[in-house]
Amino acid sequence: MMIPTSKCFFFLNLMIWMHLNLIPYSFAIRDGNPNQVMAAKACQGAPDVPLCLDLLNAQPEINDLKQAAFVALQAASVEALQTSEFIKTTRDKEGGKEEASPEGTLGDCSQDYGSMTEIMMEASNSLSSGLTEGSDVSVDIKAAIAKGETCGKSINEAKKSPKAEEVAKKNEHVIKLFSNALSVYNVYASANGNGNDNSKPN
């Protein structure tokens, strides 16, 4: 577990890194048709094909599978970070009302998402730096999915509340995005001779 200072440093680096790597994709939409052929190939095995296509078709400058995998992973990572911040804010607002709130549940989810952000940072760094050990990236993404599933299980087993239900919906969306990212990554890995049997989360 990171100490508060190192955790703040981690999130600061994360935000700077995402600004440099993800924002250029976000503003890449120009006149002209998106690369629908590339998007269709990348999303062919995705658990949620429409969601995957919507994401990649919005990025017309994607011209290879590695870029598609990177964009899919970063979209999931940004959503995970936003969900982590939502959980933290909700916990802060619910302070002092532990018996009437899903405090324990959100505490568990907060830890899960803290681990998830570290995991996805490692996966993104491996992918962007050109490392070819496909199993490393896919295992990292699967680990992030597992953290989301653990959070979802905690919510399902706890006393229901409006805030917990909202976290559950956000968590489900994060899992979908990471599952799609895993599928897109494995299409890229297979095309580059690094295919494996990790196309679906455990």
Image: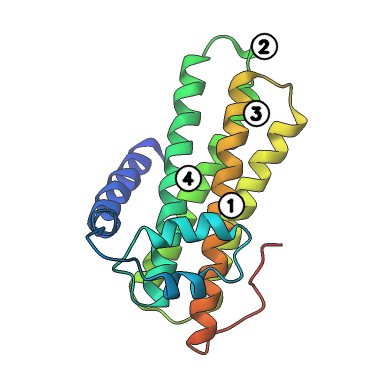
| Residue contact at pointers 1 and 2, CB within 8 angstroms | no
Say whether disc 2 or disc 4 marks the residue closer to the N-terminus: 4
Query: Can you see residue 163?
Result: yes
| Residue contact at pointers 1 and 4, CB within 8 angstroms | no
Q: Which amino acid type is marked by label 1?
A: Lys
Disc 1 to disc 4, C-alpha distance = 11 Å
Q: Is residue 80 above or below residue 124?
A: above
Residue where numbered disc 2 is placed? 99
> Within the image, what quadrant is residue 28 found in?
bottom left
Residue where numbered disc 4 is placed? 80
Which marked residue is nearer to the observer: mark 2 or mark 4? 4
Residue where numbered disc 1 is placed? 176
Nearer to the camera, 30 or 76: 30
Say whether disc 1 or disc 3 marks the residue closer to the N-terminus: 3
Please tell me whether mark 4 sits on a helix, a strand or a loop: helix
Q: Is residue 46 left or right of residue 63?
A: right
Q: Which amino acid type is marked by label 4?
A: Ala
Classed neighbour count for the residue bearing mark 4: other residues with Cα under 10 Å, few (<14), some (14–19), many (≥20): many
Q: Which amino acid type is marked by label 2?
A: Glu
Q: Is residue 126 left or right of residue 41?
A: left
Disc 1 to disc 2, C-alpha distance = 31 Å
Which marked residue is nearer to the observer: mark 1 or mark 2? 1
Q: Is residue 128 above or below residue 84?
A: below
Say whether disc 1 or disc 4 marks the residue closer to the N-terminus: 4
Q: Which amino acid type is marked by label 3?
A: Thr
Nearer to the camera, 33 or 125: 33
Disc 2 to disc 3, C-alpha distance = 12 Å
Which marked residue is nearer to the observer: mark 1 or mark 4? 1
Say whether disc 2 or disc 3 marks the residue closer to the N-terminus: 2
Residue where numbered disc 3 is placed? 105
Disc 3 to disc 4, C-alpha distance = 17 Å
Q: Is residue 91 above or below residue 139?
A: above
